[in-house]
Amino acid sequence: MTETPILEFESLSISFFTRRREIPAVMDFSARLMPGEAMGLVGESGCGKSTVALGVMRDLGATGRITGGTIRYRGRDMATLSPDELRALRGREIAMIYQEPMASLNPAMRIGRQLMEVPIIHEGVSKPEARARALDVVRDVQLPDPERILRAYPHELSGGQQQRIVIAMALMASPALLILDEPTTALDVTVEAAVLDLVRDLGRKYGTSMLFISHNLGLVLETCDRICVMYSGEAVETGAIGDVFDTMRHPYTQALFRAIPLPGADKTAKPLVAIPGNFPLPDERPPGCNFGPRCAHFRAGRCDTQEIPMFDVPGDRRHRTRCLRHDEIDWSRMALGGAPDTAARIGGPVLRLEGVRKYYEVAGAGWFGSGGTQVVKANEDLSFEAREAETLAIVGESGCGKSTLARMLTGLETATAGTITLDGRSIGDVPVHRRGPGTVADIQMIFQNPFDTLNPSMTVGRQIRRALEVFGVGRSERERRDRMLDLLDLVKLPREFASRLPRQLSGGQKQRVGIARAFGGDARIVVADEPVSALDVSVQAAVADLLMEIQRQHRTTLLFISHDLSIVRYLADRVLVMYLGHVVEIGDTADVFAPPYHPYTEALLSAVPVADTRVRKKHVVLEGEVPSAMDPPPGCPFQTRCRWKSRVPDGLCEREVPPMVAFGPGGRHQIKCHLARAELEAMDPVITRAPD
């Protein structure tokens, strides 16, 4: 190519220096980003993705240093730029969007002033012109009422709106290069889809090149032209999206894809395959191939005797791999799915909810409470049952009432109306402090973030034994210690971990401790609230399959709360879709993922990123924000965002809450919608996949 790359890395090495040693974070990293291209940077936590981005921004802190190689922006070596030249580049020609939008927003400044700062500082424009440009870019990022947005403070916006403002701020100076570091991780799947549509459209409008950092291969497929897979500080495979996704030539890339729930994966017939072993620490990398200790194709005496260079993959433009044996391995044998497992036999109902509601009274908006009280309708008329050894997934956007439901089940809240029964015992009006040890042990919870659920000053063994004391398990300390060791065996952790503190464990190991604690009292029901969303994809597979294995052994009912419909499709036997406190659809997983759909389910499925080039999705744009539970719309809760509403006559959607309509054998698939049955049954599939 004769065109000068926007960004070029050549044999880049970055280290961090402590008082004791140099810790290499990135080694021999080479990649090119051409004008107008979008390149995805993927890999497990700690692989060096963000370090590469911070190297571009020259923001490595006091201890970080580029120790070798070069970073060139439009042919200029970034290391030779003076502080003034760097300051002129940042924000104007190179902009960065971080994972957490509030890291980029000043909570004490109005949005308009923060946006106006960019052209005022970088281009010296007047305040009126800067404000006009701020209004234009707020319209570009499709935020309603731009004048109100400019007057608002960051805390007055939702998470999706904050992220759009950060994108607007990055684009104010029409940068040539945009770096996005996990920009949608904290967002709902529908907001994520809207933000990515926005980024793609604005990239085309402004001609911006993008470096997109993500652990989600589906997002990279939908957003990028090229991909670079990193492992332990090195680029191990790079190439065009189609080349790498369809003709992978590095064992780590293959291992990543076998660990994510692609269409066709099945928890019994084709279970996910977790990557064996652990990610190496930066100062404990093995000789030769970094991936060698975890690779099924490793050859001692060959793969561990030399530094491995990048090799060109024949037949594919700019497709390269860091594998000595790339031309010897039979890649067709790395098919999806591991050894089949035995399916759990689902029993009778264990948990039943009938007409359950949860309302909160909150103070009004007036001074000193003069606004009276208002009611937040968190859950409305929840009626369903969960069966023994079943996995029932509960999905929906933030604010739909999933977590409130979990709090009622565990006794942290009590129901306002309706009944919740566990094995025939009414528990909906019994708070946790009034429940006996047996009932507490019967319904346990696994939380989203394993870092926040363990006491940092208490050993792993002591934390599990403490839970056993609460559950009333064991008559003596010795019996509880033996049970604790058995639980460590159950979650496949070494027994010596009992004496370790949480800070000495990885994220996946911490989550296993949380699982051991939840199953300590032989729980009848485990409420898993986003239990794998904070984990790397390779660890997700191991934790998900561990949950399934324990469920088969103990016949536990698993209520799996998630916004990730890919993992839901893989794990769940049935799916319950919630919107604004209502159950809008429930049924067997295969039925919910195929038409007929509730219009909200259709939009959720359309927003799911799928890391498979053979998958085609119908594009459904979900307009607007989730309404407030304090002021829900009349009639159907979804009617303010529904693209099908015009097909329902006489304004019925705006007047009446729809009834549940049953479909399929035995009426197990139910949809709460006013659309005519014929309209629902004639819906096209959202997700289709070409045959292999």
Image (tube, rainbow, N blue to C red):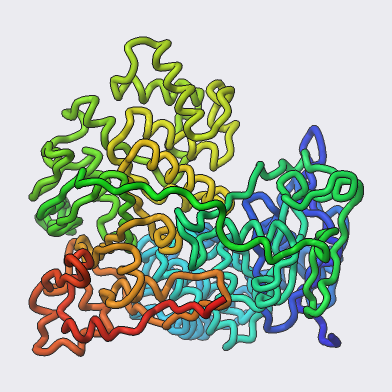
Task: List x then y, in percent, for residue 7.
Answer: 76, 73
Query: Image height check: is 88 above or below 463?
Result: below
- The residue depicted at 10 percent of the width and 46 percent of the height is 419
Quarter of the image with the C terminus in it: bottom right
Closer to us: 28 or 180:
28
> Taking the image as drawn, is residue 239 in sight?
yes
Query: Image height check: is 215 above or below 204?
Result: above
Question: Horizontal placement of 29 versus 689: left or right?
Answer: right
Residue 87 falls in which quadrant of the image? bottom right
Residue 669 falls in which quadrant of the image? bottom left
Task: List x then y, in percent, for residue 666.
Answer: 17, 65
- The residue depicted at 39 percent of the width and 37 percent of the height is 553
> Taking the image as drawn, is residue 108 in sight?
no
Quarter of the image with the N terminus in it: bottom right
Task: List x then y, in percent, for residue 304.
Answer: 86, 46
- The residue depicted at 78 percent of the width and 40 percent of the height is 283
- The residue depicted at 17 percent of the width and 40 percent of the height is 422
Query: Image height check: is 281 above or below 499?
Result: below
Task: List x then y, in percent, for residue 35.
Answer: 72, 83
Please give the count of numbered marks on the rendered protein. Answer: 0
Closer to us: 412 or 667:
667
